[in-house]
C-alpha cells in the first residue's frame, strides 16, 4: 500500500528522468512521476528514432520536455529530483552537477522502495542472484498456497514494480534482485530489507566501480541498514573475503549461513547429495534433493540460499522438495537448447565472470567445445584460462577479450 501523503509531494515537482533504460525502468519512473503531478523532463543519449517504442508508450502523458541525443546541463534547470538509470556511472558529469546543486539523485527502484510497505527480500551477489531470486519467489508461491497473489518479483531480474506499487499490500512480500549498480545508490539512501541474501562474492564490474573495494562496498550496502530484527543470509565460504578477518561482512541482523559442508549453524548445507535445512525452530532437519534441471554445485548453493530465505519469510519448508520439481531454470543459465548427433548444446551466456564460467565447466564430465568471449571488465582471467586448458577439447573465442 502506498502512502498518499508522500505521493502528494510529487505534485508540481520538477523532475528529470535520465535514461529510459532497459526493463521499462525509466519509462515507469516517468509515468509514475507524471501521474502524480510532477513536471517531467526526459533526457537520453539516444535519438527519437531509437526510442520510438518507449516514446510511444509515454505519448498519453503530459511530459513537459524531451531532450534527446545528449544530456545537456540545462535539463537540471529548476530540477528537484533526478532519476538516473542505474547503469549511469557514479562519476557521470551530469550526476556530479546535480549533486553539487543539492538535487535529490535517485533511481527507479529506490522510488519504488520509498513507497513500499510490504516485507522485502533483497538478493545480491556476483553470480547466481537471478536464479536465487526466482527460486525464492517460486518456493513462496508453490510451497505455501496462502501466499498466492501476495508475492511480487522484481528488480534487476528484469521486472519494474513501480507501476504496480498501488496493488502491493503491507502483508505482501516483495522479492527483489539488486545489482551492484542499484546498490551503489541505494546504500546512500539507507534502505533496509527484512531479509538480505548474498549469494557469493568475487570481483566484478571493476570497469564501472573503479576498484574491488568500491564494488564490495556496494554489495555491503544490502546489510548496512538492517537491525537485529532482520535476517542476513550469507555463504559460509565467503564470511571473510579473501579469508581475511578484517574484511568480514558487517552484519547486525540475525544470520543464516549456507555452504557445501556442515557449518554448525542455522542454515543450509550439502551432505551426501542432499540439501539439509536446519534451524533451532525445527525438531528435525529438513532434507531434500536439488532437481536435475538445476545442474552443478553452484545451483545447489543457489537453492540452499533460496531455501533459507523462503523459510524465513514463512514458507512451508516441508514442501520445498515438491515445489522445486516444478521450477524451470531461467533462460541463458545452463540452458539445454538442442541435441543432435549425440551432442548437447548448452547456453550459459549469462556467465560473464570467470567464476561463473568455471562453475559451468565443472558440470560437464565429457569433451567440451567452448564458445567464449566478451569485453574487458577488469577481471583476472588466469584461473579461467587454466580450467580451459584442463577441461576443454576445443575453444572458439569471440569479442574484445579474445
Image (spheres, rainbow, N blue to C red):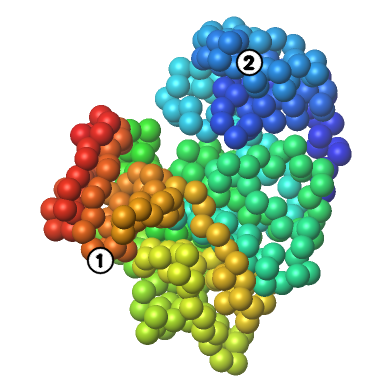
What percent of the width, then of the height, locates residue 78? 68, 12
To which quarter of the image does residue 237 belong?
bottom left
Residue in the picture at 51% in, 22% down = 95
Give residue 74's quadrant in the image. top right
Please, which residue is most extreme toward the bottom here? 283
Marks 2/1: CA–CA distance: 47 Å
Which mark's residue is nearer the viewer, 2 or 1? Answer: 1
Image point (42%, 25%), residue name: 91
Q: Residue at x 48, y 31 (%)?
A: 87
Residue 33 x/y as whole percent: 75, 26
The local secondary structure at tag 2 comes to helix
Q: Tell me the residue that label 1 is attached to.
A: 365
Q: Is residue 65 above or below residue 9?
A: above
Structural crowding at the residue carrying mark 2, measured as other residues with C-alpha within 10 Å and reported as few (<14), some (14–19) or many (≥20): few
Horizontal side, residue 79 vs residue 366: left or right = right
Residues 342 and 376: in front is 342
In this view, 282 is above or below 164: below
User: For this view, does 373 lie left or right of residue 194?
Assistant: left
Q: Nearer the viewer, residue 369 or 173?
A: 369
Image x and y of residue 22, in percent: 56, 31
Q: List the residue tagged with mark 2.
A: 52
Q: Is residue 86 left or right of residue 119?
A: left
Nearest the viewer among 105 and 52 is 52
Q: Is residue 282 above or below residue 90?
A: below
Left of 310 or right of it: where is 38?
A: right
Amino acid at each position: 500500500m502506498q502512502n498518499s501523503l508522500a505521493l502528494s509531494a510529487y505534485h508540481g515537482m520538477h523532475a528529470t528522468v535520465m535514461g529510459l533504460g532497459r526493463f521499462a525502468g525509466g519509462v515507469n519512473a516517468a509515468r509514475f512521476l507524471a501521474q502524480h503531478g510532477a513536471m517531467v523532463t526526459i533526457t537520453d543519449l539516444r535519438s527519437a528514432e531509437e526510442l520510438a517504442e518507449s516514446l510511444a508508450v509515454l505519448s498519453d502523458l503530459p511530459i513537459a520536455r524531451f531532450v534527446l541525443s545528449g544530456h545537456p546541463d540545462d535539463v537540471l534547470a529548476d530540477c528537484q529530483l533526478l532519476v538516473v538509470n542505474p547503469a549511469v556511472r557514479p562519476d557521470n558529469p551530469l550526476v556530479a552537477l546535480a549533486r553539487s546543486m543539492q538535487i535529490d539523485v535517485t533511481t527507479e527502484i529506490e522510488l519504488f522502495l520509498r513507497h513500499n510497505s510490504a516485507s522485502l527480500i533483497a538478493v545480491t551477489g556476483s553470480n547466481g542472484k537471478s536464479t536465487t531470486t526466482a527460486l525464492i519467489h517460486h518456493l513462496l508461491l508453490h510451497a505455501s498456497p496462502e501466499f498466492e497473489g501476495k508475492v511480487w518479483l522484481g528488480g534487476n531480474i528484469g521486472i519494474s514494480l513501480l507501476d504496480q506499487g498501488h496493488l502491493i499490500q503491507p502483508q505482501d512480500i516483495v522479492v527483489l534482485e539488486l545489482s551492484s549498480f542499484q546498490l551503489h545508490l541505494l546504500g546512500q539512501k539507507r534502505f533496509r530489507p527484512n531479509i538480505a541474501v548474498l549469494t557469493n562474492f568475487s570481483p566484478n564490474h571493476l570497469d564501472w566501480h573503479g576498484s574491488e573495494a568500491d564494488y564490495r562496498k556496494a554489495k555491503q550496502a544490502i546489510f548496512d541498514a538492517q537491525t537485529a530484527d532482520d535476517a542476513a543470509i550469507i555463504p559460509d565460504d565467503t564470511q571473510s573475503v579473501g579469508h581475511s578477518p578484517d574484511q568480514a561482512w558487517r552484519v547486525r541482523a540475525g544470520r543464516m549461513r549456507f555452504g557445501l559442508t556442515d557449518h554448525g549453524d542455522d542454515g543450509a548445507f550439502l551432505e551426501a547429495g542432499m540439501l539439509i535445512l536446519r534451524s533451532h525452530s525445527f525438531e528435525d532437519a529438513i532434507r531434500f534433493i536439488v532437481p536435475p534441471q538445476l545442474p552443478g554445485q553452484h545451483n545447489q548453493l543457489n537453492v540452499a540460499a533460496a531455501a533459507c530465505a523462503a523459510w524465513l519469510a514463512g514458507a512451508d519448508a516441508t514442501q520445498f522438495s515438491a515445489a522445486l520439481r516444478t521450477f524451470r531454470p531461467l533462460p541463458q543459465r545452463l540452458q539445454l537448447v538442442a541435441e543432435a548427433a549425440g551432442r548437447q548444446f548448452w547456453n550459459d551466456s549469462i556467465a560473464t565472470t570467470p567464476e561463473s564460467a568455471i562453475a559451468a565447466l565443472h558440470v560437464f564430465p565429457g569433451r567440451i567445445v567452448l564458445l567464449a568471449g566478451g569485453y574487458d571488465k577488469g577481471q583476472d582471467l588466469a584461473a579461467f584460462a587454466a580450467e580451459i586448458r584442463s577441461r576443454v577439447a576445443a575453444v572458439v573465442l569471440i569479442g574484445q577479450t579474445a
